[in-house]
Image: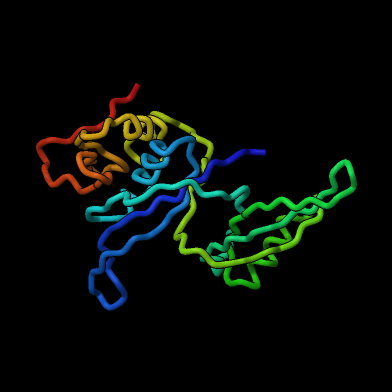
Amino acid sequence: MIQHTWFECKIRYEKVMENGMQKKVTEPYLVDALSFTEAEARIIEEMTPFISGEFTVSDIKRANYSELFPSDEESADRYFKCKLNFITLDKSGKERTTSTCILVQAADLRDAVKKLDEGMKGTMADYQIASVSETAIIDVYPYEEEKNLDDSINKSANSPVVRRFISELPEGCKTTLTISGKAIIIDKTGKNTKVSPDQSKTKKETIPKK
């Protein structure tokens, strides 16, 4: 069973609303990473192709989810935090309760409970659903199998070479980089890491292929 370490990353940017107006919003995303620096690198990779303007990684914190139950259903466009209590017996026969949180992708609260029970089928320990609540999480980025490393560096996100380059950038540094064919500026000179399009066509830095 793959062990995940989840980080909640908040991205602040100007979003075009349904009425056509632009509004500054802060959206949380869940990222599977080994450290805070890798979580920041991964969310920059994932967000760069989809945000045309500038965005800031305004916050990163650990998220205490033990498991993720994803769904391919089109209607399942929300994420629910489900807290479970497991009841076990110690050596003396006394009941002991341990808690864990699972993130479930579902259409609504009722669907979340249904998908939670389906995901927990086969669990040997008795459990009780303590709470189910909708989160503000927009999307989740678990680790995926990395294939064809050289070809993926400049054509798609989720490249370990790009990720390592970003995570190793020191604080106070500012550099240009190409991700998914898009030239960006990564600015670590302020409190939060800021990412913006590179408007200059004369200076573009890409990571060389090994």
Give the residue displayed 53% in from the left and 37% down from the top. 145
- Furthest residue to the bottom? 19
Give the residue displayed 55% in from the left and 69% down from the top. 75
Viewer-side residue, 142 vs 28: 28
In percent of width and height, residue 97 lies at 75, 53
Give the residue displayed 43% in from the left and 30% down from the top. 149
In the rendered image, the quadrant that contains the N terminus is: top right
Viewer-side residue, 17 vs 205: 17
Give the residue displayed 38% in from the left and 60% down from the top. 27
Whether residue 180 sits left or right of residue 137 in the image: it is left
Whether residue 180 sits left or right of residue 136 in the image: it is left
Q: Is residue 110 above or below residue 144?
A: below
In percent of width and height, residue 197 lies at 20, 48
In percent of width and height, residue 195 lies at 25, 47
In the rendered image, the quadrant that contains the C terminus is: top left
* Among the 4 quarters of the image, the one containing residue 208: top left
In percent of width and height, residue 47 lies at 35, 50
Q: Is residue 82 above or below residue 90?
A: below
* Among the 4 quarters of the image, the one containing residue 101: bottom right
Viewer-side residue, 25 vs 131: 131
Whether residue 123 sits left or right of residue 45 in the image: it is right
Viewer-side residue, 200 vs 7: 7
Tell me how the rendering is colored. Answer: rainbow
